[in-house]
Amino acid sequence: MIEMQNVQKTYPNGVKAINGINVKINQGEFVYIVGPSGAGKSTFIKMMYREEKPTTGQILVNGINLAKLKNSKVPIFRRNLGVVFQDFKLLPKLTVYENVAFALEVIEEHPEKIKTRVMEVLDLVKLKHKVRSLPDELSGGEQQRISIARSIVNNPKVVIADEPTGNLDPETSWEIMDIFEEINKRGTTVLMATHNREIVNTIRKRVIAIENGKIVRDEVRGEYGYEG
Ligand code: ADP
């Protein structure tokens, strides 16, 4: 479960990016975060994976209070979390296999188990045949599928995605959404910031709209709802 209580975030330059947010997200939910540029979506998402700390308030993710979590404990916290970025962030010199296996090697998982699990998640994203490729030998959509495989290799309870289809063409974006839906069906919470109106209005899920650092709308099967 994820919970924010009276969360505010002011950056060192004085910009108040989040201005009093209270929200609860249950295990297994699929939530879109929408809102105009500069609304605070990225800040909201970054606080969830402890890339940014709130200035005031509490953030609980899987029972851990992120406002109090020491920097040294962040890597352990992130093992229960998958993060997917707009620009993929794959390691360019590592193969697909190595990129996906990395998170399991860090925790010294048994090599046979690593192999089985990596092939399992590559199968889920339908890219087993690219296991020996380097990221720059793949299309944008394929790179994003690999980064999703990497995000779930640890079996996290929550996957957080910041504009995961932002760099992709419409057809590829739908393929990426199929994968997120499949991950969610298996019980993982999915939290996704997006500007993709068509996706939000077609694959109907909970929509949290943020404007000026506040939640202005929270609907169970919501719509995108902006002209921009
Ligand atoms: P969104 O993702 O909705 O576009 P952001 O969370 O990126 O919104 O930004 C919210 C506000 O915080 C904006 O005014 C932005 O300029 C500001 N901001 C974002 N990151 C920083 C930062 N690291 N330092 C200072 N201001 C920031």
Image (spheres, grey):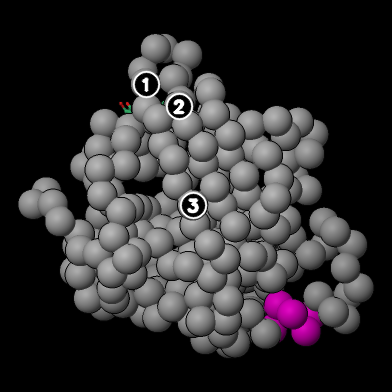
Labels 1 and 3: the sequence-earlier one: 1
- Residue 8's label in the rendered image is 2
Q: Quadrant of ligand 1?
A: top left
Q: Is residue 17 magenta?
A: no
Q: Residue at x 38, y 74 (%)?
A: 177
Which stretch is magenta? 115-119
The numbered disc on residue 16 is 1
Q: Main secondary structure of the magenta part?
A: helix
Q: Quadrant of residue 214?
A: top left
Q: Secondary structure at mark 1?
A: strand
Image: 4 above or below 7:
below
Label 1 near label 2: C-beta < 8 Å? yes
The numbered dot on residue 1 is none
Q: Amino acid at mark 1?
A: Lys
Q: Return the residue nearer the eye: 186 or 198.
A: 186
In the image, what residue type sits under mark 3? Lys
Q: Is residue 135 visible?
A: no
Residue 32, image quadrant: bottom left
> From the viewer's perspective, is 123 left or right of 65?
left
Mark-to-mark CA distance, 1 and 3: 22 Å
Mark 1, other Cα within 10 Å: few <14 / some 14–19 / many ≥20? some
Q: Quadrant of the N terminus?
A: bottom right
Residue receiving disc 3: 24
Residue at the (49%, 52%) spot, across then down: 24
Count neighbours of disc 2 (C-alpha within 10 A) and say few if under 14, some if 14 to 19, many if 20 or more: many
Horizontal arrangement in the rendering, residue 123 relative to residue 32 (left or right): right
- In the image, the residue with mark 1 has its CB under 8 Å from the nearest atom of ligand 1: yes
Q: Report helix, strand or loop for mark 2.
A: strand
